[in-house]
Amino acid sequence: MKRVVAIVGRPNVGKSTLFNRILQRRDAIVENEPGVTRDRHYGEAEWAGKKFSLVDTGGFVPESSDVFELAIREQAEIAIEESDSLIFVVDARDGLTSIDQEIAIMLRRSGKKVVLVVNKADNEKYDQEAVDFYNMGLGEPYPISAMNGRHIGDVLDVVTQDFPPSDMSEEEEGGPLKIALIGRPNVGKSSITNAMLGQERAIVTPIAGTTRDSIDSTLRYHGQEITLIDTAGLRKRKRVKESVELFSIIRTTRAIERCDVAIVVIDAVEGLERQDAKVIVEAAEKRKGLMIAVNKWDLVEKDTMTSKRFQDAIYEALPTFDYIPIAFVSAVTRQRLVKLIELAQQVHAERHKRISTSQLNDVILEAIKNHPPPAVKGHDLRINFIQQPQAAPPVFLCYTNYPELVPENYTRFLEGVIRKHYGFVGAPITIVYKQKNRLRTSGYSTRTM
């Protein structure tokens, strides 16, 4: 799982410039529209073969002088809580300020790894200014220039020295089934977790979470050990709501990375929201097993067709995700929670399913014969052979004469044939086209349209 590194410091010390320098972005994104928080302040970085998530805490602090210092303090608090490492930025030209010292006290108390960088040291004459920051008690200060890139590599060497290489598998083989409950705030994720753990047949063992951003519990259901990952809610703060929102997004991303099956919890009263759809797309892009739990079903006035209409509305809104099973549950009454666990076990098994090459070719090639791919740019497309080289997540390899010309709608057709005959309920599948030594990936079933 990728580590999270937060850039902290008072305003105007160059946090955003350093953020963009590390991400190799030329310009900051400055749109003020709602919903762009993640794009503006969060990115995936890589240094020396090590990937990590980078957070820019700049831009959240209001300019009102009466709440100025309180907002800075809250911003630093949440960054400390939610990150694995911190880059503390100070200004070589301003020198050490009282706000710098206050932030330094918080960072020392945290016990987290802190790399102190003295920004705006554009040349050697400013390096001497960095000496003044030694007495902050945060170790060696590193003079840098975020503007021209001076000494940035040295800082990243220190930041990432304990990080695992990116080629290490994100998904561990074996071990218990890991289920993440994800979704918008206040949809009942923790309530479902607690109700599941209260089932009579469950043997509950609380275990220490591997990150601060999730609460892991273990239950044993019919002999199978299951880890429930509940993305714990963040403490609300009055002055830095955007920061809370950003770190909540990161928590969800980390939970998805760790899990085998993601249960997206939505509110039965509110219905499917845009944010719900974004979470579903993210989990599918990471090729995780997927389910939807419609919680608070006890609050809905129902007739015999209510669940069918609700399900149809979800599939209509998400037409490329009609392979995702939907369960209607209530954490309060514990309605269908056992079914939710069993459905997650089924999705996990489907994601690990392998189909023999002979079966695939008998069935899929017959479907291709009856519904051949269209000619493209004067070329007749032929698919001669298909196999499944990988499970968890399932990947299908098709040998064709023109891999780059297979249209997206034909990929959707092949996916439909595969699902019709072999299921793969709740499991995103990937179809890859190959010709000799040429390889192209096309037509992910998870693409948004």
Image: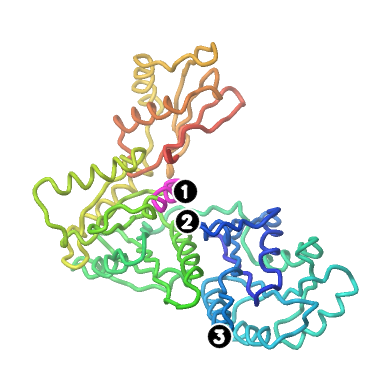
* Element assignment for label 3: helix
- In this rendering, the label closer to the viewer, 1 or 3: 3
Name the residue that disc number 3 marks.
Answer: 66
Label 1–label 2 contact, CB within 8 A: yes
Dot 1, how many residues are within 10 Å of its Cα: few (below 14), some (14-19), or many (20+)?
some
Q: In which quarter of the image is the C terminus?
A: top left
- Please give the name of the residue rendered at 18% of the width and 59% of the height, measured from the top-left corner: 297
Q: Is residue 126 left or right of residue 210?
A: right
Mark seen at residue 257: 2
Q: Earlier in the sequence, mark 1 or mark 3?
A: 3
Label 1–label 3 contact, CB within 8 A: no
Q: Residue 179's quadrant in the figure?
A: bottom left
- In this rendering, the label closer to the viewer, 3 or 2: 3
Q: Position of residue 367 (x, y in %)?
A: 34, 19
Q: Position of residue 240 (x, y in %)?
A: 50, 74
Q: Distance between the residues labelled 1 and 3?
A: 44 Å
Q: Where is residue 441 in the image (x, y as percent from the top left)?
A: 53, 33
For the image shown, how many numbered marks are present on the structure?
Answer: 3
Question: Label 1 sits on what residue type?
Answer: Lys
Please state the extent of the stretch shown in magenta in the rendering.
278-287
Q: Earlier in the sequence, mark 1 or mark 2?
A: 2
Which residue of the protein is positioned furthest toward the right in this rendering?
A: 125
Q: Residue 79's quadrant in the figure?
A: bottom right
Query: Is 211 covered by the magenta stretch?
Result: no
Name the residue that disc number 1 marks.
Answer: 286
